[in-house]
Image (cartoon, rainbow, N blue to C red):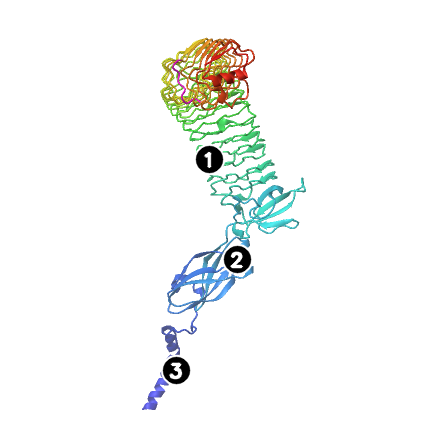
Amino acid sequence: MRLKEKNNFKKFFKKYMIWIVLVVAILIIPATNAKYILQKSASFELKPDQYNLVVTPVTTTMTSATSDINFKVKNNNEYPINVDIVYNGNVVATGITIPAKNDYSGKFNISQNVYDEVFNNNGANMDIRVISPYSAEYFNVINIELPQPYLAVRGSNIGFFGNPFDITKVAKISFSDQGITPPPGVLGSFDVSEGKQGNVVAWYTRNASDPDKYDFVISANGKVKSKNPEELFTQFTGLTDVDFTNFDITGARSLRNAFFNTISLKNINWGGIDTSQVTSFNKMFAFSGIKNLNLSSLDWSKVTDAGGMFMNAKSLETLNLTGIDTSSLKYMNEMFQGTKALKNFNPADLNVSNVINMMAVFRETGGATSYDFSSWDVSKVKYFSHLFYAAEDLKNINLSGWDVSNGENFSFMFERVNNVEELDLSSFHPINAKNMAGMFHRNNKLKKIVFNNFDTRNVTAMHMMFLNCINLEEMDISSFKTGNVKNFNSMFRNLKKMKELDVSNFDTSSADTMVAMFDGCSALKKLDVTNWNVSNAKNLAMLFMNCSMLEELNIANWNTGNVTAMNNMFYSLEKMSELRVENWNTRKVTDMSSMFAKSGITSIDLSRWDNPVLKNMQAMFNDCKNLVNVNLNGFTTPNVENMMTVFSGSSEITDLDLHTFETTKVTKMDSMFNGALKLNNLDISNFTTNANPSISYMWNACNNLSTIKADKFEFSKITASTGGIFNNFINRNIDLKVKNSTEKSWILSKYPAFTNVHE
């Protein structure tokens, strides 16, 4: 029975063997760590995700052949898989196993030869190929980048982009995209890449025109790039030519100092350089020697700062800015300063509608004799100081239509524009101006200024405003509002041809100092300052000095209670015969030296002047040749130290009563009365010599002196004098009253011819 069953099984197995094997092959698949019995072919055309793999693209930046390259594969299978890395169809890394059920981040390396190929191609994409237990390929999932070919930043580095080469020997520079291998025949080469990556190389050959100089090519695989081209060629003093073709500064923000002091520069090929993101051209061509410059191809649309851009480019003659967009420009300060030869430049090419700083834009420029700025919208400009300072070739400046209402600083704006004869500022309404110091200073040929509603209500400084405009004859300043002005020093000084000046409406209530305000206005005959409030003024020194034609001043009611300095105030007012100042408050004045010297006054009353802090009276009435009567009875001098030449040369005075003078602190009395030719009677009865004053030539040339009351004067104790106190022509019969017998003996020992010396 068993045998029969066995035979039947054999017959059944034999009959159905093929089908049994097929069923087993289909139903039973080993899942062990051994190799698979069945290997699926890629020809099945199954998609990669059907293999339960997730391959994530990864980017790696390589710096050398030894750099690790990253990849990422997530294996969701119950078994491991083996992969190769493929580049351009060739396996570059093998033997990589991805463990089962693993989110795997791996690394591999490539050979130097493969790296060189990647380097020459400026990067690469690689594939992951599954080699077992089945075949599949994932393309371009490993991205290799190389450091970008960035040129080294020069900054403060004075060498050749990080290399010790004498940059003054560089004549020409061009950029190339033809790789990093120097061609045969070059004299030398450098790695000029950022961080010495080796991907930007410069090589040089001898310059054909000058064998002591060299021509450079800076090259990379693709365009040479620059993150920061600031100071790119600073101090390349021998550089003549630059070709920017194949130079990429996309994204760069600044070209500051790019050609600073390139004194030999002649030609620039911009080569389509992209400046669309540049915001600063500050000092870009400062001190450059370039003669003709075309910047019309550059993108100026985001440039805010062009300060000092062409500063002291003294050879620059022609500047082409046609078609540029400067609507973003804010800072033009010193932009053209020192361009001594600039003849061909059209201001209309510049849109200045957003500019806020025009300080010194055309300072010390030359070449052009005429500029038309009527197209400029300066309504946002705050700083006009030194705008045309010393632009001495200019003869005509058209500023018509200028809205300067936002301007704050106009100081020295037109100083030394020495060939301009007329300025029309009728459109100027500077209501926000604060500083006009020196605005028209030293314009030698300027004859006329046109003002129309020149509203200066916020100005605090007008010192030197018209100083040394020696030919200025005509201007109407009646619209000036000066209520906030603190400093009037030298405002009209040396206006030698100005015959009329209407300052009657000037509000001087805030004035702190008026030094030399009208000094040298030698043609001025009338000046109405009657209603001026000088109650806050501290310094009136030289205020009317050298106004030699001025005949009248009504200043009797001035409140001078805060004034500390009156020296030279009325010096050389030759036509002024009378000054009413008897009610002035001089309690804070420390200096009255030369106050009335060389004036034409015939009499003056200062008897009420109380001077508790006065220190300097030197030459106070020196050379007052018309002065006959001076009332100083009550004039106090408790702290005066210097009385030198007080009345020297006042040849018409006959009597002087100085008995209220206190001289306990006086150290200098030299020539005090020297040349007072008609002085007859002198009362110095309260004079003392406690401070041992020098009294040399004190009464020299006082030939008519007949009486001196010197009751307290101790001649015998003075040791500081070097010269005689009387000359040989003194009246030997002079009535000289001295302190005591000791003083009498001393006088007679020096002047034995005196006949009337007594106690």
Q: Quadrant of residue 267?
A: top right
State the quadrant of the C terminus: top left
**Is residue 150 visible in the rendered structure shown here?**
yes
User: Residues at badges 3 and 2 in contact (C-beta under 8 Å)?
Assistant: no
Task: Indicate whether residue 68 is drawn in magenta.
Answer: no
Q: Which residue is mark 1?
A: 305
Q: In the image, what residue occupies the spot 48% across and 60% down?
A: 68
Please name the amino acid that badge 3 sits on: Lys
Residue 198 vertical position relative to residue 668 in the rendered view, above or below: below
Magenta segment main secondary structure: loop
Ranked by sequence position, the earlier of labels 3 and 2 is 3
Q: Report x, y in % for residue 571.
A: 47, 15
Residue at image mark 3: 14
The residue under label 2 is: 64
Q: CA distance from mark 3 to mark 2?
A: 66 Å
Judging depth in this view, the residue of 725 and 29 nearest the camera is: 725
Magenta-colored stretch includes residue 639? yes
Element under disc 1: loop
Indicate which disc, 1 or 2, sits on the residue closer to the N terminus.
2
Q: Tag 3's secondary structure?
A: helix
Give how far apart the Cα atoms at labels 1 and 2 are: 41 Å
